[in-house]
Image (tube, helix red, strand yellow):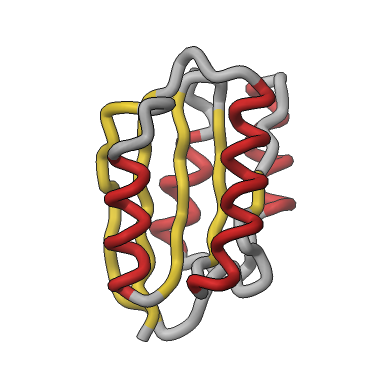
Amino acid sequence: MISQYLYISTAPSLSREDVESILTTSERNNPARGVTGLLLYNGRNFLQLLEGEESELVSLMLRISHDPRHTGISMIDRKLVGERSCPDWAMKRVRIAESIEKRRTMLEADLPTRLDAQTRKIITNFVVLN
């Protein structure tokens, strides 16, 4: 079984370069750790789905919790799953459209089809927040 974590955090003052740096680091480091997932950033908050062995995710969450670029980390969901929802994504940035009306539609096109209904609903609800 694979562990799957879904968390939200606050990071209101990140530049586009900061977000790109986080993604580049994740894309470089995650394959060696067997971690996959996706990342959304709405200009104020991150929502991240992480998948992998429990010990790797615990270690990663510890590093994330000490990262000064964001605070207020709150675990939304933590569970065991039979298969990865994002098996091919070392860390996929899911872009959020500027227009609130287009956000849900664009996100639905990008989200992996393997996501369970509850996780999909949490993620799609996140994108309409500002």
Rendered-image quadrant of the N terminus:
bottom left
Q: In this view, does 12 lie to the left or right of 14?
A: left
Q: Residue at x 62, y 18 (%)?
A: 15
Q: Is residue 103 left or right of residue 67?
A: right
Residue 122 percent across, percent down from the top left: 42, 46
Q: Which residue is drawn at 29% across and 40% down?
A: 65
Q: Residue at x 31, y 76 (%)?
A: 80
Name the image quarter holding residue 101: top right
Q: In this view, does 3 lie above or below 38?
A: below
Name the image quarter holding residue 70: top left
Residue 76 percent across, percent down from the top left: 28, 48
Q: Residue at x 59, y 70 (%)?
A: 31
Q: In this view, does 1 lie above or below 96?
A: below
Residue in the foreground of this view, choosing between 29 and 42? 29
**Circle count:** 0
Residue 57 percent across, percent down from the top left: 35, 64
Residue in the foreground of this view, choosing between 103 and 7? 7
Q: In this view, does 56 lie above or below 17?
A: below
